[in-house]
Image (cartoon, rainbow, N blue to C red):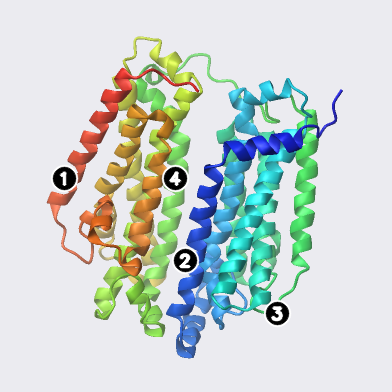
Amino acid sequence: MTGALTGSRHLLRLVLRRDRVRLPLWLVGLGGTIAWSALAVPTVYDTPAKVAGYAATVGASPVSHLMSGRQPGIDTIGGITANEISQVAQLGVCLMVLFLVVRHTRAEEESGRAELLRSTVLGRHAATLAALGYAVTAAVAIGALTTGTMLAAGLDATGSVAYGVGLAFLGTCYAAVALVAAQVSGSARGALGIGGSLVALGYLARGVGAMQDNALVWLSPFGWAQSMNAFGDERWWPVLLLAAATAGLLAAAARLTARRDFGSGLVQPRPGHPRASNRLGTPLGLTVRLQRGTVLGWSVGMFLLGLVYGAVLPTVPDLLASNPDIADYIGAGGAAEDAVTDAFLRYILLFMAVASTGYAVSSVLRMRSEEEAGRSENVLATATPRGRWLAATVLTSAAGTLLVLVLAGVGLAIGRGLAGGGWSGSVALVGEQVTYAPAALVVAAVAVAAVGLAPRLALVAWAVVAFVGLQVMLGAILRLPDVVNGLSPFWHLPGVPEDDLVVRPALVELLVAGALVALGHWGYRRRDLDNA
C-alpha cells in the first residue's frame, strides 16, 4: 500500500531532469522579453511631457483597456511599464504553466509513460503534485525575474514587488486550471484547448470589464492580479482571491483524479460515425480532418488580433503627437506623419505575419507528434507512400497559413473601418498582409526539413520562429547587422505599405521553401520511423 502522494519528490526531480532544456528556454524567452520591455520603457518616456502624453492617450484608450486593463498609476513611469508588459507577461505566464502542466499530466497518460511509472511505488496524486510544483516554480521564477528587472530599471520597490507577486499568483491559479482541464479531457490536445479557452475567457472578461469600467473585472483572475494596484495605491488582499480560487481548483482536480479511470478523462469522446467519409481514405482528407481544429483556432485568434490592431490604427496620429519617440521604435524616426503611420501599419502587418508562422510550424510538427504516437505507422502500413503522407501535411499547412493571413488582414480592415479609419483600401490591406506569406512558408519549410532529416531536433523550428520575431520586433532598436537580419526571410521582403511591392524576393523565397521541402521529403523517405 502506498500513500496518495508517495513518490512526488522523486517524480518532480524526473520532471525537472526531462525539462532541463525546455524550462530554461521558457524562462529566457518569456523573461527576456519582459525584461527588455521593462528596461526600454524608461528610456522612451524620459520626460514628464511624454509620460503625461501617454496617460492622456493610451491611458484613456478603450483599446488599451481591452488589451491591458485599467492599469493604476498610468501617469507614472512604473504604471506605464506595467501597462506595456502586461500583455506579454500575463498571457505568457498563463500559457507557460498550461503547456507545462498538460505535458506532465495528461500527455504522459496519453502516451502510456504514466502507466509505467504508476506500476512502481507511486501514489495516485503524485503526478498532479509534481506537475503543480513544477508549474509554480516556473511561475515564481517569472515573477521574480519581472520584479528584479523593474528594480533594475529604477522603478518603485513596492510596486515592483506587487506586480511580480500578482504575476506569480496568476500563473499558479492557471496551473490549477490546467490540472482540472487535464482531468476533464482524455487527450492532451483537448486539455490544452480547454485551458487555452479559459485563459482567453479570463483575459477577455478583464478587458471588457475594464472598457466598460464595471464589476466584470472581478470575475477574472487577470482582474484580481491587476487589482493589486501595482504602482498605484498598492493593496495585497486580492492575492487572497487568487489563492482561494487556486485552492478550490486544486480540490476539484484531486477529486476528479480519484474518481476517474486512469488513462481516460471525465468527458468521454463521442463515438464516430459507423462509416467514414470517402475523403478520410486519402492522406490529404485525413490530414485536413486532423488539423481542422488547429486551423479554426488560429484563424479565429488571428482575426480577433487583427480586429484589435485595426481599431488602434486611427489613433496613431494622436499617439505620435504625444510621444514622437515611438517612431524610432518602429524604425521611422524623423519621417513625416503619413510615412510614420505607414511604418506603424507595416509593423503591425509584420507582427501578425510572424505570429502566423506559429500556426505554420505547429501544423507541420503535428506530423512529428503523429509519428511519435505511432499513428503514422498505421497509415504507412497501408498502400500510402511516405511522399503522399508528407505532401498532405505540407499542402494543409501552406493552405492554412494563407487562410490565417487572409483572415488577419480581414480583421485588420474591419477593425480600422469600425474605429472610424474608413473602408477605402480594405481589399488592398488584406493583400498587403498576404504579401508576407512567402516568409512564413520558408519558416514552415524549415520545420519540414527538420522533420525529414532530424526528427528529434524538429523543435528547433520554434527557435526559428523566435528569431524572426526578435528580428521583426526589435531589429531596428537593437541595430542588428545586416548579416544577422538577412537570416530572417521577412527582412528580404518589401515592407508594404511603406515600400513598393517587388515580386522577385517573394519568388526567390518560394523557391527556397520548395528546396527545403524537397530536402525534407528526401530525408523522410529514407529514414526509419521514430516512435521514441
Which is closer to the viewer, label 2 or label 4? 2
Could you tell me the amino acid type at mark 2?
A: Trp
The answer to whether 323 is drawn above or below residue 474 in the figure is: below
- Residue count near mark 3 (Cα–Cα under 10 Å), binned few <14, some 14–19, many ≥20: few
Could you tell me the amino acid type at mark 1?
A: Val
Residue ID for mark 1: 508
Q: Is residue 197 visible?
A: no
Q: Quadrant of residue 492?
A: bottom left
Q: Position of residue 205 (x, y in %)?
A: 62, 59
Choose the circle earlier in sequence order: 3 or 2.
Answer: 2
Q: Give the Cα separation between the discs numbered 3 and 2.
A: 26 Å
Choose the circle earlier in sequence order: 1 or 2.
Answer: 2
**Residues under numbered marks 4 and 1 in contact, where contact means CB atoms less than 8 Å apart:** no
Q: Is residue 212 left or right of residue 424?
A: right
Q: Give the Cα separation between the discs numbered 1 and 2.
A: 34 Å
- Residue count near mark 4 (Cα–Cα under 10 Å), binned few <14, some 14–19, many ≥20: many
Residue ID for mark 2: 36
Q: Residue at x 16, y 62 (%)?
A: 500
Q: Residue at x 46, y 81 (%)?
A: 45
- Residue count near mark 2 (Cα–Cα under 10 Å), binned few <14, some 14–19, many ≥20: few
Which is closer to the viewer, label 4 or label 3? 3
Residue 298 image label: 4
Q: Choose between 220 and 103: the one closer to the eye.
A: 103
Choose the circle earlier in sequence order: 2 or 4.
Answer: 2
Choose the circle earlier in sequence order: 4 or 3.
Answer: 3
Task: Identify the element where label 1 is drawn.
Answer: helix
Could you tell me the amino acid type at mark 3?
A: Asp
Q: Is residue 442 left or right of residue 418?
A: left
Task: Identify the element where label 4 is drawn.
Answer: helix
Task: Identify the element where label 3 is drawn.
Answer: loop
**Residues under numbered marks 1 and 2 in contact, where contact means CB atoms less than 8 Å apart:** no
Residue 233 image label: 3
